[in-house]
Image (cartoon, rainbow, N blue to C red):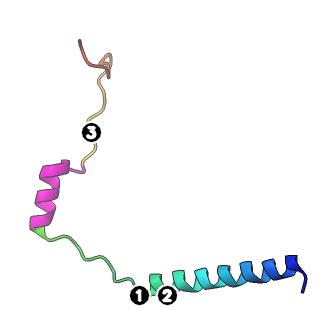
Amino acid sequence: MSRPVLVMVLVMAAAAASATTFYFVQANAPASPEMSEEQRITREKFFGTSKELPPIEKGQEMRPRW
């Protein structure tokens, strides 16, 4: 076999092995459980609520007043 054919065969084998590994890792991954109420409250205290911020009023600037 010539060198380019050998390289292509090796690249194809590596790609197939990577795809197979990725498939089996995804298939065996457990579904993430929902957060408990205590975890949700702690997360909201640390990161804040997931509510959207109020709209910016007309004329209000986004920079600090120095």
Residue in the image at 19% along x and 70% along y: 35
Left or right placement of residue 40 versus residue 13 in this view: left
**Quarter assignment of residue 43:** bottom left
Circle 1 packing at 10 Å, graded few (<14), some (14-19), many (20+), is: few
Amino acid under disc 3: Leu
Q: Which residues are magenta?
A: 38-50
Residue in the image at 15% along x and 62% along y: 40
Circle 3 packing at 10 Å, graded few (<14), some (14-19), many (20+), is: few
Asked if disc 1 and disc 2 are in contact, CB closer than 8 Å, the reply is yes
Image quadrant containing the N terminus: bottom right
Disc number placed over residue 53 in the picture, else none: 3
Instruction: Please tell me whether residue 1 is drawn above or below residue 41 in the rendered image.
Output: below
List x then y, in percent, for residue 24. 49, 87
Mark toward the viewer: 2 or 3 = 2
Circle 2 packing at 10 Å, graded few (<14), some (14-19), many (20+), is: few
Left or right placement of residue 48 versus residue 16 in this view: left
Q: Which residue is mark 2?
A: 24
Q: Which residue is mark 1?
A: 28
Mark toward the viewer: 1 or 3 = 1
- Per the model, the C-alpha gap separating discs 1 and 3 is 39 Å
Amino acid under disc 1: Asn
Residue in the image at 32% along x and 23% along y: 62
List x then y, in percent, for residue 54. 26, 35
Left or right placement of residue 14 versus residue 56 in this view: right
The secondary structure that dominates the magenta segment is helix
**Quarter assignment of residue 9:** bottom right
For residue 40: magenta?
yes
Label 3 element class:
loop
Asked if disc 2 and disc 3 are in contact, CB closer than 8 Å, the reply is no
Label 2 element class:
helix
